[in-house]
Image (cartoon, rainbow, N blue to C red):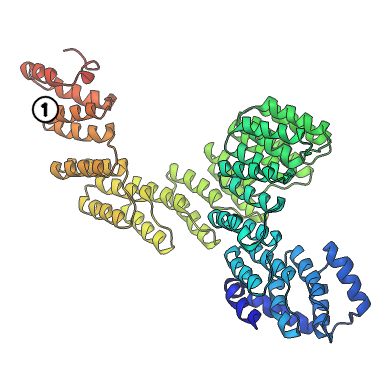
Amino acid sequence: MGTRKVIPAAFSKAFSSSSSASSAVVGKLSHSSSKSFVPNPHSLHHFLTKQCKSGAITLDQALHFFDYMSRMLPPPPVSSFNHLLGALAKIQRHDHVISFYQRLNSVGVFPDIRTLNILLNCCCKMGLASDGFLVLGKILRSGYTPTSATFSTLIKGLCVDNKIGEATRVFKNMSVFGCQPDVVTYGSIIDGLCKHGMVKKAKQLFSQMKGRGISPGVVVYTSLLHGFCFGGNLEEAKGLFIEMVDGRVQPNVVTFTVLIDGLCKQQKLQEANELLDLMIQRGQCPNTVTYTTLIDAPCKQGRVEEAYGLLDLMFQRGHQPGTVTYNTLIDVLCKQGRMEEVNRVIGLMIQRGKHPDTVTYTTLIDALCKDVRLDKANKLLHLMIQRNEHPNTVTYNTLINALCKQRRLEEADRLLQWMIQKCQHPDIVTYNTMIDALCKEGRMEEATRLLDLMIERGQHPNTITYTTLVNALCKAMRMEEANALFELMIQKGQHPDTVTYTVMINGLCKIGLFDRASDLLREMEEKGCAPNVVTFNTFIYCFSQKNETAKVVEFLLKMKQKNLSPDTTTIRIVSELLSNLKDETHQELLDKLPAFSLKELPSR
């Protein structure tokens, strides 16, 4: 009937990625019948009424009982299957829920609204919220009325999938289907709006909710509080918190932590600590996230001793810092060069059962690189891998950048190749770092080959990549190649910036193509790219070298019109030009120079 037609279309994406999972389910079902355990009516009743409701089931149990239920004649009611599907959803086996749902019709069981709501929830949890509309269509075609749970699930899924516009439209159109939002529905849309920075709209819905006599619970208050804090609106956040407490809604650990985080981000550390005390007074126990938030704030301000005090407080209250907490301390200590203390913190971390992770190692490698202890940094990278901590792109980039700065390009290239072998994909920063280093060494062919390699590997060059190569080609007086690359950059949709144009203008001026350079200046201005003092200095220098004083004055006047002040380079160029002129010409030029350039010039 209708069910068999809808599901393949509704879950085309899900099934294309989970067909092997579906086959595995069928295989396990077939295999389950040969096991010594044989379900019976009594065990089935216990399984459905006790274990499924509590969520304390295993996948094997679910497979056994589904197999048993599907063979019963007549089959159990759909409510029994709903217990099983709901329990599978609780243990995050969404693919199996879909597979079991596919088989319901074949055993003579037809889904009800509860079944379809479970299916919709799984769809959303698998990141397929748009396909949830097809499930909604199935609900309507089956003659069921969608419930507030149906819409709440769909709205939440759309928000998680960053489809906030669709979520808002679904919320607005609920009444068309004879359904009104409840506290959960309002909570879902308010949370989604806040997470997408649409706090004003969330605030309006919050007022609408209260106007309809729906009392916001702690979850809704916390979502809106997070929105205010995220937007930096602390006064509204504090006002909402007071309203919440006055309304006898008990803030939970998440509520307090959100507000503490907001205060910390605004450097209001005293208020944050006072809120921590209030939290404890009200019987809410701070968790690791709360303490890590509080420790992070003084660390960012370099106040390590204060962070140590909070760490001690954590220990006194029986909380174990997580790896993130230790990493926060390690990071600030590394930045302050307090490496002996770093070693002590790492020792404490290991002693307390927490092991350094990728972030820990990357922080240490960065500190060693900044201290130009590259051999130690390289050894630490190998130690990290031996201990089964996988370096990420940032880890490799840190060491590659340091090697390039020390002109150890062969080692940097070997590390790049090793990175690729380890299936860690270089990003734009990796390639730009290597290309820049090769260009600075004049190794243009290698830099160009690396450009080709990055494109082959699906990494698109950006403005920095092209500008680096164009600059190197201009310096090498290879203007035809530079111009070709400049044109290619535009064709590929990358917009030249002020630096790119200035580099090209400099190259053209050096080979005497002033008209083409002037055309580029006009082009950059037409495209909304403002020239800077370096751009004008390029023209001024080239014309001063040819003693074309009229042109020097022309570009100085253009600078003044653009409200650009001369820098030390401008003053030096004009001073050198004046010193090479005869007395009468010198005075004539002085009379023509813009006032802003006169005050810096030496008297003759």
Which quadrant is the N terminus positioned in?
Answer: bottom right
Tell me the kind of residue under disc 1: Thr
Left or right: where 103 falls relative to 455: right
- What residue is drawn where x is 25% and y is 51%? 482
Q: Is 79 left, or right, of 199 in this rendering?
A: right
Q: Nearer the viewer, residue 428 or 434?
A: 428
Q: Position of residue 582 (x, y in %)?
A: 7, 19
The residue drawn where x is 23% and y is 24% is: 572
Residue appearing at x 67%, y 66% in the figure: 120
Q: Is residue 299 visible?
A: no
Picture quadrant of residue 270 = top right
Q: Secondary structure at mark 1?
A: helix
Q: Position of residue 98 (x, y in %)?
A: 68, 73
Q: Nearest the camera: 175 or 38?
A: 175
Kindly identify the residue that appears in the image at 73 percent across and 42 percent down.
254
Q: Which residue is most to the right?
A: 42
The residue carrying mark 1 is 549
Residue 240 quadrant: top right
| Above-or-below relation of 358 to 274 | below
Work out whether residue 131 or residue 28 is closer to the camera in this orientation and state it.
131
Asked whether, in this view, residue 563 is left or right of residue 411, the answer is left
In the image as oriented, which residue stretches furthest toward the top? 603
